[in-house]
Image: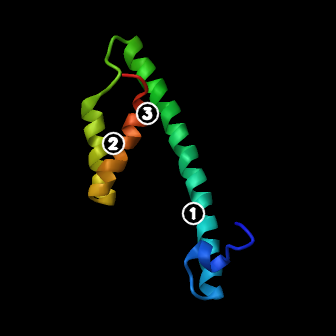
Amino acid sequence: MTAMTTTADKTGARTPEAAGLIENARERIDTLDDRIIGLIQERMAVSAVIQEARITSGGRRVNLSREMEVLGHYRDALGKPGTTLAMTLLELCRGRV
């Protein structure tokens, strides 16, 4: 934040109280985002173990029926945007197909 940028400019708030609330909430979101990223990285590692076991046993890297279950789970929990989120998550966890 430059010397000329105010808290109101940074948060879009029109009162100091609202600006403070927004700044605190954004800090919480940043913390949650860090946790979410960590969980995604953990999911990617577990997925790699599953893929390796499947491939080693003669199977395919991707199990489409399982992916459909995951897509349905996210859609049921989060609505249509959940499907998009799940697709991105599956893409991250597939690795190189």
The residue drawn where x is 58% and y is 44% is: 38
The residue drawn where x is 33% and y is 58% is: 77
Q: Kindly identify which numbered label has been placed on residue 93.
A: 3
**Relative to 51, does residue 35 appear above or below in the rendering?**
below
Q: What is the x, y in percent for residue 43?
A: 49, 38
Do the residues under discs 3 and 1 have CB atoms within 8 angstroms?
Answer: no
- What amino acid is found at the position of numbered circle 2 in the picture? Met
Indicate the quadrant containing the C terminus: top left, top right, bottom left or bottom right.
top left
Work out whether residue 45 or residue 1 is closer to the camera in this orientation and state it. 1
Q: What is the x, y in percent for residue 51?
A: 41, 23
Do the residues under discs 2 and 3 have CB atoms within 8 angstroms?
Answer: no
Q: What is the x, y in percent for residue 61?
A: 35, 21
Q: Earlier in the sequence, mark 3 or mark 1?
A: 1
Q: Kindly identify which numbered label has been placed on residue 87.
A: 2
**Relative to 4, does residue 40 appear above or below in the rendering?**
above
The kind of secondary structure element at disc 3 is helix
Work out whether residue 22 or residue 31 is closer to the camera in this orientation and state it. 22
Work out whether residue 84 or residue 9 is closer to the camera in this orientation and state it. 9
For label 1, the residue is 29
- What amino acid is found at the position of numbered circle 3 in the picture? Cys
Q: Give left or right: position of 83 versus 23.
A: left
**Relative to 76, does residue 62 appear above or below in the rendering?**
above
Q: Earlier in the sequence, mark 2 or mark 3?
A: 2
The kind of secondary structure element at disc 2 is helix
